[in-house]
Amino acid sequence: MFRLVRFASVYMKILSVRTVALPALLLPLVAMAQSSPEGEQTMVVTAAPTTVSELDTPAAVSVVNGDEMRHAAPRVNLSESLGAVPGLQVQNRQNYAQDLQLSIRGFGSRSTYGVRGLRIYVDGIPATMPDGQGQTSNIDIGSVESLEVLRGPFSALYGNSSGGVINVTSQSGSQPPTIEASSYYGSFGTWHYGMKATGAVGDGTHAGDVDYTVSTNRFTTHGYRDHSGARKNLANAKLGVRINDVSKLTLLFNSVDIKANDAGGLSYDEWQSNPRQSPRGDQYNTRKSTKQTQAGLRYERQLSERDDLSVMMYAGERETTQYQSIPRAPQLNPSHAGGVIDLTRHYQGIDTRWTHRGELLVPVTFTTGLDYETMSERRKGFENFVMANGAPQYGEEGNLRRNERNLMWNIDPYLQTQWQLTGETDSRRRGALQLGVVRFKRLLHCPGERRRQPATPATTNGCRRVH
């Protein structure tokens, strides 16, 4: 069955007569197209420890321009514009309570929750947690400058991401100051509207020069099916400050707030009867809410004509609550975690990188660095019902069934070398080395005990309820 969805969009761009310095934020250097004297364009790739031309990198890299992603699109999901990227499959589950499923050359295709096997970066801040789980919900398509997809083993330079890397870079402000407003509407109460302001003070080469980008948007829909409405608020901001002739400071802020109902699946008979119904969604009031806020700070300095230093620091918090369609009977098992997931994650990290350009018989570039990230997770589980007159009333938070704290961290020292064997700029060879350490620790609150203990197979069952 195919249905035609009606939509229309309105786009407006205004040149501002006033420059506003905003406490916005963001980070790394933007990947941009640079015009050659002949009018040709060279695509610069930043999904590597050093910025190189797309034709000079030995890795399989595809670059998607941000303007192309925004052209005649709702600007809600990455699936709108990444379908043509070789080796990348984006599966939209058509359910805003379920994340997009991304896979590169098969890596990540077996993930049932979030993105696994791949590494996602948004302006240098990992959207993939230390446990390997990634999310795309905080990517603001309205302010994307470029999106790069790195496929194959070269992505191992980013740690536990053997399948590939998706690197998103936001726009940096420039003169003249600009305000953009956009609106999209479609069937089933679908609305998306946003506003973006960009600008700069100075040309970015002198002390005190500032550039900024601020973007905010809202998406709402009633959904085609019953119990499938969703609402998403997203804000992204970037502020760059030139400290002096050789150093720059970039600030980043990102926030997303999502509330979505989960219509659930249908059997064949149910679909034949009414494809828009949601029997389990209505019965269990299945839904999901997500809140994430993060901030980052990047310092870049040219130590000499041959040496560059970059330090990136970030911290954030992500809260997720999900009500599932689990009947009461399975939850009577003492080891069952319940039908409500209550998850809070605090994460932070630092990446320090040094690049040296020298000669060892031939021109050589060394890039070495240390990446450290850590996460503290509070995971709780509740029954998804309360008893009323002897019958379960679903869709309400019930008794606590699970309470644990997970601590994760990893540390990745890395080294990459690049040497030019001839005078041709594309005759280059590269070598890379990375060592990574990942540690996971789980602490459970067990019945009758006030102390926490490490989780083992012998202590996991029954260590669910806190007294």
Image (cartoon, rainbow, N blue to C red):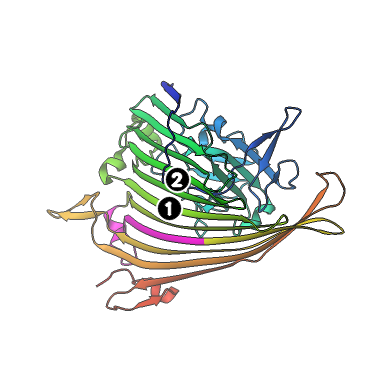
Residue 58 placement (x, y as % from top left): 75, 47
Mark 1 and mark 2 lie on one chain; the one further toward the N terminus is 2
On screen, residue 304 versus residue 167, left or right, reads right
Tell me the tag on residue 294: 1
For badge 2, the amino acid type reads Asn
For badge 1, the amino acid type reads Gln
Q: Is residue 240 above or below residue 72?
A: below
Whole-angstrom CA distance, mark 1 to mark 2, is 10 Å
Circle 2 — which element?
loop
Please report the residue visible at 36 percent of the width from the left and 53 percent of the height from the top: 320
Provide the residue span drawn in magenta.
Answer: 327-349
Q: Is residue 278 above or below residue 248?
A: above
Circles 1, 2 touching at the beta carbon (< 8 Å):
yes
Residue 390 placement (x, y as % from top left): 14, 55
Q: Is residue 4 above or below residue 359?
A: above
Tell me the tag on residue 138: 2
Q: Is residue 432 above or below residue 262?
A: below
User: Which callout, 1 or 2, points to the residue nearer the camera?
Assistant: 1
Residue 379 placement (x, y as % from top left): 36, 62
Quadrant of the rendered image containing residue 301 = bottom right
Tell me the tag on residue 395: none
Quadrant location of the N terminus in the rendered image: top left
Q: Looking at the image, how many numbered discs can be counted on the residues?
A: 2
User: Which is more toward the observer, 38 or 322?
Assistant: 38
